[in-house]
Image: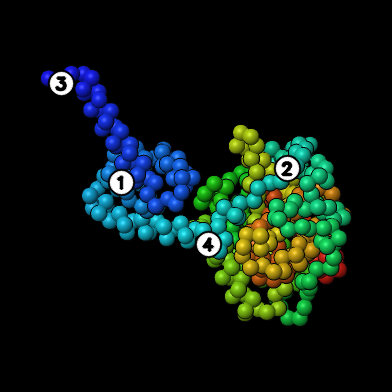
Amino acid sequence: MKRPHTVIRGLGAAALSASVLYLLAVTAGTPNAAAAFAAIRASAPKGAIRWELGDLWVRDTLSGAAVMALAQSPLLMSAREEVAQLWSQREETAAKGEEKEEDAVIVPVEETPLVSQTPTDNGVEGRTLVPSSAEGYVVSGLAYISNATDYPVTAGEVGQPFAASLGEGTPQILIIHTHGSESYTPAEEQGIVWSGDHRTTDSRYNVVAAGDVMAEVFSAAGISVLHDRTLYDYPSYNGAYDRSLEAIAAYLEEHPSIRFVLDVHRDAIEDGEGNQYKVVCQTPEGTSAQMTLVVGSDGGGLEHPAWRENLKLAAAIQNQLLEENSQLMRPILLRNSRYNQHATTGSLLVEVGAAGNSPEEAALAARLFAQGMIRVIAGGDA
């Protein structure tokens, strides 16, 4: 019978040998001590799992958790190399995507919330969001611009004339909805079928209805409009920007007369407890949803050389609308993602209200936006 201290020494020797083997495996191929230390530190949390699985020397992109799942089936484990290759291709595709969906999520800028004094008709809390100061913004006239890019933007530059203009032929304006199922909150649901969180294919209650109002106002003013009511985010949200870009390119090829492209969305804003609220302002016509113009750039690496022209157009429309109602518009958002706005120098992403707004508030905002845009691009009344 072995003595206890002999057993302890044997276990210690085994542990030491295992540690040495582990360190040799982890640091194999590292060029220097610093790299070796970094490899050891990076491998520590999952090293024990990989050792247990006999996986320490395998070099691929699969995590320890993924390997554990594969290990439950000899068939899956035998195809590990193919699984790792497919996973690697998936990550590369996501990294190189035309527009990653997370880039499409609009984060509200820091603003001062003012609780609306008007009772709400759909039971959702209403707030009017206005900047508390000019700090952190580029201010051109009445327009506040939140610049999230690394490009310098000056008020003088933004206030210059924009390139897009009405021309010959029809149609002149394309209205499209990359996320057409984004919906509002009606006072009574009346049998609405929801396709997701604050999303529906029922175009009485989603942003397509706001596009209908804009198209009607533009047409009444004698400006020809093509309104694409397709839901590019249904049934799949992923890839919506790719699909809407294909449509925009096809429309521009078929109708070279198109000078302005409006991608109409709505925002989604929550309080600290996750409750949706609406953004509103009071107008002579009633309670309107507030709106936000989002301008893309080439800051994310995608080609978009004329993005500053879109910014000039956004500032001109913003100033016009704020002259008529000082709280109708939230600050312009200048972002790194291009949002398909490279298609024309008259492309804008228009967020009409938020998920908590009622369809009626969104409809009024859409009408006021179209009327203001007409005064900017055509110099007339609507």
Mark yes or no: residue 365 visible. no
Label 2 vs label 3, nearer the camera: 3
Residue with the mark numbered 1: 55
Disc 4, SS: loop
Distance from disc 2 to disc 3, alpha carbons, whole Å, reads 71 Å
Residue named by callout 2: 110
Q: Earlier in the sequence, mark 2 or mark 3?
A: 3
Q: Nearer the viewer, residue 262 or 288?
A: 262
Residue reaching furthest left?
1
Q: Name the residue at 62% across, 37% down.
A: 275
Upstream in the sequence, badge 1 or badge 2? 1
Report crowding for label 4: few under 14, some 14 to 19, many 20 or more residues within 10 A (C-alpha).
few
Q: Residues within 10 Å of mark 2 (few under 14, many from 20)?
A: few
Labels 1 & 3 near each other (Cβ < 8 A): no
User: How far apart in space, not on screen, are marks 4 and 3 (Cα)?
Assistant: 64 Å
For disc 3, the marked residue is: 2
Vertical side of 191 occupied by 177: above or below: below
Secondary structure at badge 3 equals loop
Specify whether 4 is left or right of 284: left
Closer to us: mark 4 or mark 2? Answer: 4
Mark 4–mark 3 contact, CB under 8 Å?
no
**Above or below — where is 344 with respect to 254?**
above
Quarter of image, res 87: bottom left
Q: CA distance from mark 4 to mark 2?
A: 29 Å
Q: Mark 1 or mark 3: which comes first in sequence?
A: 3
Identified by mark 4, the residue type is: Gly
Q: Secondary structure at mark 2?
A: loop
Q: Which residue is mark 4?
A: 97
Amino acid type of the residue that numbered disc 3 sits on in the rendered structure: Lys
Alpha carbon of mark 1 to alpha carbon of mark 3: how far? 33 Å
Q: Earlier in the sequence, mark 4 or mark 3?
A: 3
All told, the count of numbered labels is 4
